[in-house]
Amino acid sequence: MDAATKTPLTSTDLRAQFRAVADRTRRVRTRCDRMMVIALSCMVVAIVFMFFPASRYHYVGNAAFGLFFVLFMSSAAISGFSMPKLVCPQCANNLLGDVDEFCPECGSQQIKRGGFFAAPRCLSCKRSLRRNKGRPQYKIRACTRCGAWLDDEGL
Ligand SMILES: [Zn+2]
Ligand SMILES: [Zn+2]
């Protein structure tokens, strides 16, 4: 990674502001992931109960874990709604939007535009800046519009 390409945010206020949003985003993501894992485990247990019709607790187990599944899935969805908006504090660009001038991974300006089938590539860090169903499959460390360096760890 070329350190010279990193342009920090102009004010410490903006940096602190973005760090707060980044931390919150990470927390909400972890919570969502955990809920999903619990929900899917409940679904597996509910399915296991379906295979033991002889058991007296067959329906109870099936219904209870089916219900847990729904509950944990809903709370994951509710957590998802509380996800903060990821915008650049400097230029108000939507950070989850399409790749613009700068590489979101390394902040370099050497972006090779994508074609109809090809994702944009960064010629500096050699990463493919793919998106899947509108979601970036790359880490966001820099603003792709103004090039401001936002987060070392990436979001
Ligand atoms: Zn790059
Ligand atoms: Zn920006």
Image (spheres, grey):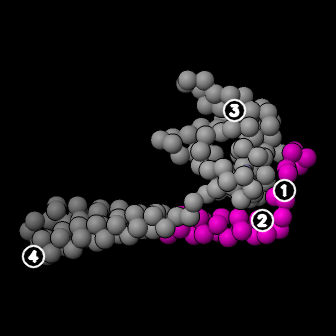
Looking at the rendered structure, which numbered label has been put on residue 121? 3
The amino acid sitting under disc 3 is Arg
The amino acid sitting under disc 1 is Pro
Determine whether, in the image, residue 59 is placed left or right of residue 96: left
Looking at the rendered structure, which numbered label has been put on residue 96? none
The region drawn magenta spans: 2-31
Whether residues under marks 1 and 2 lie with C-beta atoms below 8 angstroms apart, the answer is yes
Whether residues under marks 4 and 1 lie with C-beta atoms below 8 angstroms apart, the answer is no
Q: Which label's residue is closer to the chain start, 1 or 3?
A: 1
Instruction: Residue at 69% x, 32% y: name it.
Output: 121
Q: CA distance from mark 2 to mark 3?
A: 27 Å
Determine whether, in the image, residue 121 is placed left or right of residue 44: right
For the residue carrying disc 4, how many other residues have a C-alpha within 10 Å: few (<14), some (14-19), or many (20+)?
A: few
In the image, residue 103 above or below residue 61: above
Magenta segment includes 10: yes
For residue 131, what is the image quadrant? top right
Q: Residue furthest front?
A: 91
SS at badge 3: strand
Query: Dot 4 corresponds to which residue?
Result: 56
Quadrant for the C terminus, please. Answer: bottom right
The amino acid sitting under disc 4 is Arg
The amino acid sitting under disc 2 is Arg
Task: Point out the frontmost of discs 4 and 2.
Answer: 2
Mark 3: C-beta under 8 Å from nearest atom of ligand 1: no
Q: Which label's residue is closer to the chain start, 2 or 3?
A: 2
Query: Dot 2 corresponds to which residue?
Result: 15
Whether residues under marks 4 and 2 lie with C-beta atoms below 8 angstroms apart, the answer is no
